[in-house]
Amino acid sequence: MDLKTRYLGLELPSPVVASPSPLNARLDVLKQLADGGAGAVVLPSVFEEQIWHEQRILDQLVEHGTESYGEALSYFPTQAAFAFDSSNTLGLIEKAAKELPIPVIASINGTTDSGWTDTAHDMAEAGAAAIELNVYFLPTDPTVSGADVERRTLDVVEAVCETVQIPVSVKIGPYFSAPAHMARQIITAGARGVVLFNRFYQPEIDPVGLTVTPSLQLSSRHEMRLPMLWVGVLSGRLGGSIAASTGVENAEDVVRYLLAGADVVMTTSALLRHGPGHMEVLVRGLEDWLAARGVNHLGAVRGMLAHGAIEDPEGYERANYIKVIQSWAKG
C-alpha cells in the first residue's frame, strides 16, 4: 500500500503526523511514532515568552548592575514562570533529525516578529526539516482591528520565511473574518502551507473560589467539522500544503480529512489518550480502509469530496445550512 504524500515540499511515508505534545519531547517516543507509521513528527513548541525569558537572563548576566532595561523587565513574569533551555530543544532536534527516518518539524508559538528569527535559524541549523509557526494571539484589546491581527500574523510569517531556507507552515485559528483569504495571504508571505486549526485557550471561571482558572480539554470528534469545512474549501485553491488538525480519534477521521483534501492529518489528543502506539492503529486503519475499496495509493481518494471536486458543492454552502435547519423543524 502506497501511503506516500508530499507536505511542504517534503516526501512523507504516510499522511498521519504527530503534532506537538509533551510526548514528542522524548526521543524514544519519537522513534515509536516513526515505527508506528507516522509520516512526520512536530516537536513541542518553543514559546515566544520562553525565548524572551532566556534572552533576559543572558542580558542580566552581561549587563549585571545596570538598570537600563529595568522598566522593560516589568512586562514579564518572574524567571521561574518560563523554564527554558534552548540547548535542550536544539539538542532534541539534532538527535531526532539524525536518528529518525522521517522529517522532524520544529515548532514556535508566539505573537510578534521579534525573537523568532534567531530561534528559527538555530532550529534549521540543528537539522529541522521544516518549521511550524503557531501564531497564537488573542486580540482582547477592543481597539485592535481585524486588519491589525492579520498584519501581525503576516509580519511573523514574513520575518521567519526570510530568515530560514527550510519550508515554513503556519498554524492559525479559525476566527479570521475570511479564513480562505487569510490562508492565501500566508502563502503569499512565503509559507509553504497552513495547519487548520489552532485551538485557542479558553479559561474556566470558578464560582466558588471566584477565580479564573486554566482549563485544557483534549479535542473530540465533534470539533472536526469546522477545520474539515475549510480544508474542503481550500483544497486545490491554496497554492500550498494543507494540514488538518483537531478531533482525530480513529482511522475514519483520518480518511474524512483526506477526502476533504488534506495533504496530511495531524493528531495530538488521540496519542495523549491512547499512547504513541495508537499511531500504528491510525495508519493501519487507513491502509485497511483503502484496501477494502481496492485503492492502492492515496492520490486516488485525496480531495475526492473537496468543495471544488464534487458536482454539487451545496454541502459546503449556505443552501445546506438552510436544509439542515428546515429538516430539524420538520422532524
Image (cartoon, rainbow, N blue to C red):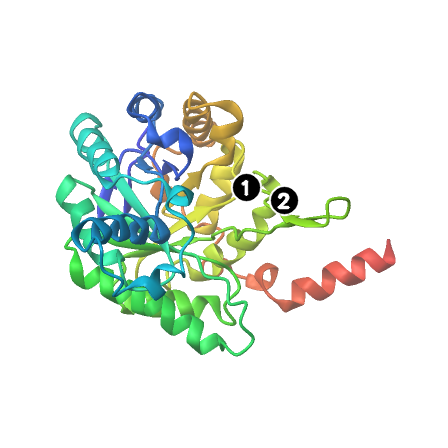
Residue name at image x 32 percent, y 40 percent: 84
- Would residue 238 appear left or right of 273 to someone viewing this image? left
Residue 222 at x, y percent in the picture: 63, 44
Label 2 crowd (10 A; few <14 / some 14-19 / many >=20):
few
Foreground pick, 197 / 155: 155
- Would residue 246 appear left or right of 234 to someone viewing this image? right
Evaluate if marks 2 and 1 touch, with contact meaning CB atoms under 8 Å apart.
Answer: yes
Foreground pick, 289 / 178: 178
State the image quarter where residue 327 is shown. bottom right
As drawn, 234 above or below 201: below
Residue name at image x 59 percent, y 51 percent: 202
- Would residue 83 appear left or right of 217 to someone viewing this image? left
Label 1 crowd (10 A; few <14 / some 14-19 / many >=20):
many
As drawn, 170 above or below 84: below
Q: What residue type is labelled 1?
A: Gly
As drawn, 33 above or below 241: above
Disc 1 target residue: 247
State the image quarter where residue 99 is shown. top left
- Residue most extreme to the front: 65
Foreground pick, 251 / 216: 216
- Secondary structure at badge 2 equals helix
The disc label shown at residue 184, or none? none
Foreground pick, 157 / 22: 22
Residue 237 at x, y percent in the picture: 37, 64
Q: What residue type is labelled 2?
A: His
Residue 135 at x, y percent in the picture: 39, 58
- Secondary structure at badge 1 equals loop
Disc 2 target residue: 222
Q: State the separation of the CA atoms marked 2 and 1.
A: 7 Å
Residue name at image x 17 percent, y 47 percent: 122
Residue name at image x 59 percent, y 65 percent: 317
